[in-house]
Image (cartoon, grey):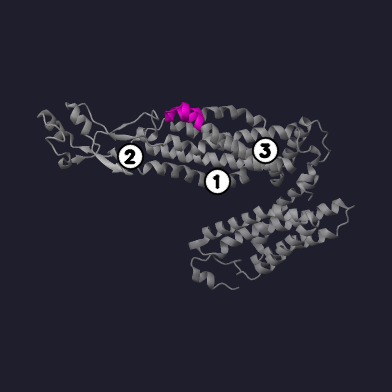
């Protein structure tokens, strides 16, 4: 199969189409920068002390009803306790003077049973003052940041999976909407628990949006423009979000106003749906060649370039997946697993080796060999997936299958770099992948046979299987 970049080389690197994608995707990462650090201002802890309800206290007693304590070497009012108000009220009514008639250290203290009073010198309000995240609940303040980044952690995993399954563009816009909607919804949180749930979901959207934008741009752009986009474009716009955030926070001292200001501008990104296309590279990988070709032809039109008649002719090879899956089904129904999987992998390996012998003036034969290899590897992957579930016992079957699927993703991550080896020798990627396929085919023969046997329930049953 010809390299994808070679197929779209006629587009150039910096036409109107590429400029539009470059700047719009870069701009889409600005809210990611503002969102990731907004919790610093939203959850800041203002100075606070126990609230003193309306009480008939003299000014002397009002001045000392909050005990002092040493904090970082300084005398400060206690944030979490006060002198018992009923005792203080009684002493005030009797005319006692604190410090002269009454030794304050002997008075009993109590918690902030009437709530807290918060300083408004810096902020009008934060979630700390809104939900009283102080004293016994002080742990909720730093945990809010943890909740957000747990969302980021989960989002970075699921966004990649969803993007590979459903496409870059839909995941990009869905996660952007997720970040915007749940950030906006935080303003109406009736409790810290609801706020934290929404914060987690906005974290999911934040990283999902960033990762999708990064991958989408990297796949659409090419050459030095791709490098510029990945190294400076999205990163600088992300940093621009960092720079804008303090400006918003300076003028908007109320946490709700700040979140509204950070979320509502994202509505401006709605028109991007009509300007940012799906990744043609991803569409080709999914066998949706006609859709990819339509996008590339539209890009050529924007760049005022005439597109060749057959852009992705060689990618028609993906059509071989249908007979490959049918073959896998028949093999699983009638053939031993080891030999079926090994033979299919070996077929793919042989095609990778033979393809090097095809003369350059026979492109049809070259494509035929590629299709043969695609057929073999697709058949084997389908067989191996079923084979994996049959090998392991019930106790770890799901874990083992998931682990094997994860390891296969490692191969997907490394594959682009393997094909870059063709710079040094045209057929080096084919030799390397063919050799790995031969090793895999041989290794498969040493696995236990599961054809016609019940699924193992225990490790003991798994160990007793014939190898």
Q: How many neighbours does mark 3 have within 10 angstroms: few (below 14), some (14-19), or many (20 or more)?
A: many
Residue at 74% across, 48% down = 319
* Sooner in the amino-acid sequence: mark 1 or mark 2: 2
Q: Position of residue 259 (x, y in %)?
A: 47, 30
Q: In the image, which residues are magenta?
A: 246-261
Q: Tell me the residue that label 3 is attached to.
A: 278
298 or 133, which lies in front?
A: 133
Q: Quadrant of the C terminus?
A: bottom right
Q: Quadrant of residue 47?
A: top left
Residue closest to the far right: 361
Q: Are marks 1 and 3 in contact (CB under 8 Å)?
A: no
Observer-side mark, 1 or 3, equals 1
Name the element at disc 3: loop
Q: Which mark is residue 196?
A: none
* Sooner in the amino-acid sequence: mark 3 or mark 2: 2
Give the spatial CA distance, label 1 vs label 2: 31 Å
Picture layout, residue 278 above or below residue 360: above
Q: How many marks?
A: 3
Give the spatial CA distance, label 1 vs label 3: 20 Å
Q: Position of residue 317 (x, y in %)?
A: 76, 49
The answer to if 96 sits in the magenta stretch is no
Picture layout, residue 437 above or below residue 19: below
Q: Position of residue 298 (x, y in %)?
A: 75, 32
Q: Tell me the residue that label 2 is attached to.
A: 134
* Sooner in the amino-acid sequence: mark 1 or mark 3: 1
């Amino acid at each position: 199969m010809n390299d994808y970049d070679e197929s779209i080389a006629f587009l150039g690197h910096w036409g109107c189409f590429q400029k539009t994608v470059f700047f719009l995707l870069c701009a889409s990462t600005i809210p990611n920068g503002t969102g990731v650090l907004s919790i610093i201002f939203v959850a800041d802890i203002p100075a606070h002390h126990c609230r003193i309800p309306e009480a008939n206290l003299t000014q002397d007693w009002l001045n000392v009803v909050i005990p002092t304590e040493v904090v970082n070497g300084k005398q400060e009012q206690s944030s979490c306790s006060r002198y018992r108000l009923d005792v203080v009220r009684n002493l005030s009514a009797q005319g006692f003077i604190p410090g002269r008639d009454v030794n304050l250290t002997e008075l009993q203290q109590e918690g902030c049973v009437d709530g807290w009073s918060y300083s408004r010198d810096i902020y009008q309000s934060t979630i700390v003052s809104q939900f009283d995240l102080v004293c016994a609940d002080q742990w909720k303040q730093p945990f809010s940041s943890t909740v957000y980044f747990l969302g980021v952690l989960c989002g970075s995993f699921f966004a990649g999976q969803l993007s590979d399954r459903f496409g870059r563009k839909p995941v990009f816009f869905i996660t952007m909407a997720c970040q915007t909607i749940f950030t906006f919804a935080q303003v109406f949180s009736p409790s810290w628990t609801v706020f934290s749930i929404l914060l987690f979901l906005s974290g999911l959207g934040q990283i999902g949006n960033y990762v999708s934008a990064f991958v989408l741009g990297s796949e659409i752009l090419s050459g030095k423009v791709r490098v510029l986009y990945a190294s400076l474009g999205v990163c600088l716009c992300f940093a621009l979000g960092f720079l804008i955030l303090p400006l918003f926070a300076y003028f908007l001292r109320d946490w709700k106003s700040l979140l509204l200001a950070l979320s509502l501008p994202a509505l401006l990104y709605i028109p991007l749906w009509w300007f940012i296309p799906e990744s043609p590279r991803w569409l080709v990988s999914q066998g949706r060649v006609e859709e990819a070709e339509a996008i590339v032809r539209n890009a050529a039109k924007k760049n005022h370039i005439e597109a060749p008649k057959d852009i992705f002719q060689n990618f028609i090879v993906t059509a071989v997946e249908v007979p490959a899956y049918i073959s896998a089904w028949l093999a699983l129904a009638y053939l031993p697993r080891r030999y079926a999987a090994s033979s299919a992998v070996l077929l793919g390996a042989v095609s990778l080796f033979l393809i090097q012998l095809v003369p350059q003036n026979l492109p049809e034969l070259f494509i035929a060999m590629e299709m043969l290899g695609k057929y073999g590897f697709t058949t084997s992957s389908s067989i191996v997936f079923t084979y994996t579930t049959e090998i392991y016992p019930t106790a770890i079957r799901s874990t083992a299958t998931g682990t094997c699927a994860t390891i296969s993703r490692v191969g997907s991550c490394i594959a682009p770099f393997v094909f870059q080896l063709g710079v040094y020798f045209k057929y080096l990627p084919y030799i390397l992948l063919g050799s790995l396929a031969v090793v895999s085919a041989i290794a498969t023969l040493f696995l236990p046979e599961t054809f016609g046997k019940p699924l193992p329930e225990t490790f003991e049953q798994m160990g007793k299987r014939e190898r």
